[in-house]
Image (spheres, rainbow, N blue to C red):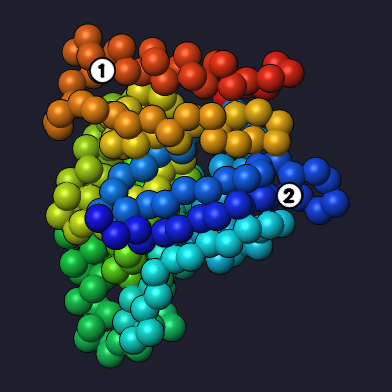
Amino acid sequence: MAAIVDIRGLAIAYGAAPPVLAGFSASLEQGSFTAIVGSSGVGKSTLLRVITGLSKPAEGTVTTPDHADGRHRPSALVFQEPRLLPWRRVIGNILFGLEGLTLSTAERLERAVQALSLVGLSEMAERWPHQLSGGQRQRVNLARALAVRPSLLLLDEPFSALDAITRHQLQNELLRVWRDTGTSILFVTHDLDEAVYLADRVVVLGGRPARVVRDFTVDLPRPRDRDHTAFADTVKDLRAALNDSLVDGAGI
């Protein structure tokens, strides 16, 4: 399967300080679901920003999909906080993400309506952000990203602030959207259970500066059962790899 993202020799540094991430190379295949885990401060969130072009790496190259027609964005980033505009209704927040694309007004509205339908919030289109629950706001955040029809969807711990029940519901929603759209997903999380439940590949970062210490294939059938012994064993194996990578008391 063709690579949709190709990263070579990437290094991430903050100012003049030594790199926090170095020598990072990876390729992401079209339609894949990849998770990244690692200790705090290894540059996971910044890595997503580099891939989307919001930040520049200290070294290395990132080759991402390109849409010359202006009707799509090559990638979209979903943050941990929904970051919705409080003065816009739900549908207006989705439309905001479509500004700058060469779409007619009718096409933008159609895209927004379809994105809300994808995340199961069609009936919430005219509500204000303050009228939504935390899980609903994060669904709107996801819909805003999906509306631009990205080839690559990047998510930075999007469910970490939610309660366990809502988090599990949104994990299942994300898997459904992934199956329905075929979008490639790169997902950053501190939750090893979440990584194993969602992804088919988990990249473990560790060390100082951080590097890839394990590129882990999750060889479990879908839908995955968190109560199954094989699931628990896979999480345990992943935790062992992560623990082995921690140095100087760094935590996750």
Q: Residue furthest top?
A: 229
Q: Earlier in the sequence, mark 1 or mark 2?
A: 2
Q: Tell me which amino acid carries mark 1.
A: Phe
* Side of 71 where 225 appears, left or right: left
Q: Secondary structure at mark 1?
A: helix
Q: CA distance from mark 1 to mark 2?
A: 35 Å
**Residue drawn at x 41%, y 64% as measured from the top left:** 75
**Residue drawn at x 55%, y 16% as measured from the top left:** 243
In the picture, residue 56 is in which quadrant?
Answer: bottom right
Q: On residue 13, which mark appears?
A: 2
Q: Residue furthest right?
A: 16
**Residue drawn at x 33%, y 76% as measured from the top left:** 72
**Residue drawn at x 40%, y 39% as measured from the top left:** 35
* Side of 55 where 129 appears, left or right: left
Residue annotated with mark 1? 231
Q: How far from the left and from the top, in percent, is residue 106? A: 22, 86
Seen in the picture, residue 87 relative to 190 is either above or below; the reply is below
Q: Secondary structure at mark 2?
A: loop
Q: Residue 140: tell me if it is visible.
A: no
Q: Are marks 1 and 2 in contact (CB under 8 Å)?
A: no
Q: How far from the left and from the top, in percent, is residue 233? A: 31, 12
Seen in the picture, residue 7 relative to 247 is either above or below; the reply is below
Q: Nearer the viewer, residue 225 or 117?
A: 225
Q: How far from the left and from the top, in percent, is residue 183? A: 27, 57
